[in-house]
Amino acid sequence: MTYSVALDWISFTLKGLADETGLLRLLTPDGEIHPITPRNGYTTACSSNIGVQFHSNTNRPEMGIHVIVAGSSLRMLEELGTSTRTLLQIAISVHAKVSRLDLAKDAKNERISLPSIYSACERGERTGTAQKVNERRDPDGGHTIYVGSWHSDNFFRLYNKSAEQNTEGDWFRMELVCKSDVAKTWARVLAEPKADWNALLCGKVRKMLNTNVDSYNRWLEGEATEGLPQIEKRSDREAWIIKQVIPAVLEHLKNTPNSEAIKLLMSSLNFAVSDRWALIDALDVENKPE
């Protein structure tokens, strides 16, 4: 079995337009940005080609630039050579106001029994500060346990990542979600060079929920490498896109730089990304425990 720990989401606000540290350039590695639908009171928004979102209000510049970096963008940044720890350290160094931070520990090739964990909680065989433990099961095999309330400043969830990603094998994720002042505090703590992310995450999770289920305790006690786990297997559609679609599109772009088809594709993808975020927000609201 292998364990890894990393940021899986960070959102923060930058005041002012100066970018002396190159943070904004780091988040737009090819310099390309595309307009998307603004949210949360902002009037304009754009996305970089790796999916990082930037929101601002043209009528209220004092609101600054709100930046959202989701797990898929963090993975791309790691592939480009910027670790999640480095990104967090840069954000803290420019006094970014962190409003949400998700810290995740993945267990791969480890049989985690989510039903056993939830059943133990249902029987009252648990201690900890969390007042609520809920679950959601999906027809495709997805199973998520929610510990605490989404409306609080921190809660965590345990879920079957392989079912979500449509990959084979055992892959489970433990994800601590921190918001507001808790997110600010955790960001400063995690940015410390010697901060042990695995120990901090597991200590917080155990404080919220402690139960005597073997696989749960192995998960908490397992030593973890830092960084997002590698996706070893992909669905047939993913493989088709990677092996056939992307090379064909790049070849066409090379031969036809002003292709209307490429422009339409980019526009469609950008629109889809924008809608995807709205859908994720809606699903979050529907699926979070009250």
Image (cartoon, rainbow, N blue to C red):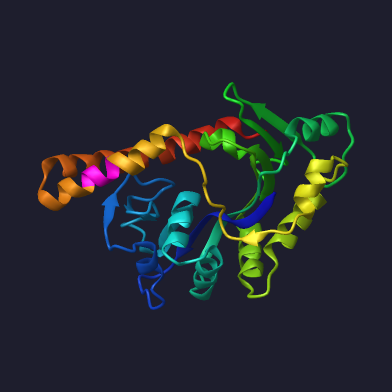
Left or right: 121 in relation to 66: right
Q: Is residue 209 left or right of residue 14?
A: right
> Does residue 130 show up?
no
Q: Quadrant of the C terminus?
A: top right
Residue 203 falls within the magenta-colored stretch: no
- Between 95 and 53, the residue placed more toward the observer is 53
Q: Position of residue 114 (x, y in %)?
A: 73, 34
Q: In which image quadrant can residue 259 be found?
A: top left
Identify the magenta region.
Answer: 245-249
Q: Is residue 223 above or below residue 19?
A: above
Percent across and percent down for residue 197 are 68, 63
Identified at 29% across, 40% down, the residue is 244
> Of helix, strand and loop, which mostly describes the magenta segment?
helix
Q: Is residue 268 shown to the viewer in this render? A: yes
Residue that appears at 64% across and 57% down: 5
Number of numbered discs visible in the structure rendering: 0
Q: Is residue 75 above or below residue 247?
A: below
| Residue at the spot 79% in from the left edge and 35% down from the top edge | 117
Query: As displayed, is residue 53 above or below residue 169?
Result: below
Q: Nearer the viewer, residue 109 or 277?
A: 109
Residue 109, by quadrant, is: top right
The percent coordinates of residue 12 (x first, y second) are: 50, 60
User: What residue is shown at x 89% (from left), y 33% (from top)?
Assistant: 124
- Residue 123, how many percent across, how many down? 88, 29
- Residues 90 and 220: in front is 220
Instruction: Spot the residue most to the bottom.
Output: 20
